[in-house]
Image (cartoon, helix red, strand yellow):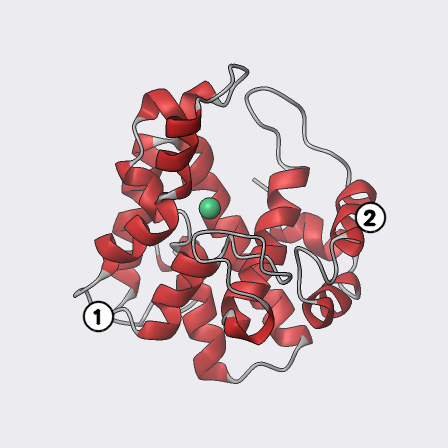
């Protein structure tokens, strides 16, 4: 079992985190399968950026749990994204998965750095993201890394309403977002990772 549970399996946080991922998978399969891939890509970017071991571990758990707030977003809204348009109030509910995720995790041993990844993974480097419109260094570095990993997986993974795009397209879109959606330093580190390596990290 340990071999399949991912890194940091001996951390006291692992059983709680993995239980949340299992719950998320049961609630919305696409999201539950997405977050472990984002955690693996995030770890690889952390290595490329020489992040310290303790920050790397926080990033890992943050990325593993980044969409956990979708547990409290109704399935009718999560599944509606397979084609139909969301109403403005449904979008608001969906965007709230960020801070509602941190609410779910509070008091369960996850530190501030981990919670920041969950709360800030949709912040844009230029300040146009949500939920707080933070910009630049005001967004935690771990969240800025998770944001790039999240985008790569979102672009390349098959969704119920479309096939995933190839690596080259994802790379191009992420490079184009450097300085607006993404931290340019994170993008630079990310682009050095080979397509083969990313494909192994995101393999089903
Ligand atoms: Fe998200």
Q: In this view, does 32 lie above or below 74?
A: below
Q: Is residue 144 left or right of residue 58?
A: right
Most foreground residue, 96 or 157: 96
Q: Which residue lies furthest to the top in this view?
A: 84
Image depth: mark 1 or mark 2 in front: 2
Question: Mark on residue 58?
Answer: none
Q: Does the residue labelled 2 lie within 8 Å of ligand 1?
A: no
Give x and y (percent) for residue 44. Answer: 62, 66
Q: Which residue sits at x=44%, y=19%?
A: 80
Most foreground residue, 104 or 9: 104
Looking at the rendered structure, the secondary structure element under dot 2 is helix
The residue wearing badge 2 is 172
Q: In this view, does 168 lie to the left or right of 61?
A: right
The residue wearing badge 1 is 109
Give x and y (percent) for residue 141. Answer: 54, 73
Q: Is residue 27 above or below residue 49?
A: above
Residue 6 seen by the camera: no
């Amino acid at each position: 079992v340990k071999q399949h549970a991912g890194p940091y399996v001996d951390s006291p946080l692992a059983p709680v985190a993995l239980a949340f991922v299992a719950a998320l998978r049961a609630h919305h399969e696409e999201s539950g399968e997405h977050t472990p891939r984002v955690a693996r890509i995030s770890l690889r970017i952390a290595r490329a950026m020489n992040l310290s071991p303790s920050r790397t571990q926080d990033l890992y758990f943050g990325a593993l749990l980044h969409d956990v707030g979708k547990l409290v977003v109704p399935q009718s809204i999560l599944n509606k994204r397979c084609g139909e348009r969301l109403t403005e109030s449904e979008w608001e509910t969906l965007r709230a998965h960020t801070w509602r995720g941190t609410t779910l995790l509070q008091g369960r041993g996850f530190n501030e750095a981990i919670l920041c990844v969950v709360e800030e993974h949709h912040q844009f480097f230029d300040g146009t993201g949500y939920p707080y419109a933070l910009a630049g260094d005001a967004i935690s570095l771990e969240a800025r890394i998770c944001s790039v990993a999240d985008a790569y997986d979102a672009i390349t993974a098959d969704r119920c309403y479309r096939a995933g795009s190839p690596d080259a397209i994802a790379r191009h879109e992420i490079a184009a977002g450097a300085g607006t959606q993404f931290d340019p330093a994170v993008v630079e580190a990310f682009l050095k990772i080979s397509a083969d390596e990313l494909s192994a990290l995101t393999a089903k």
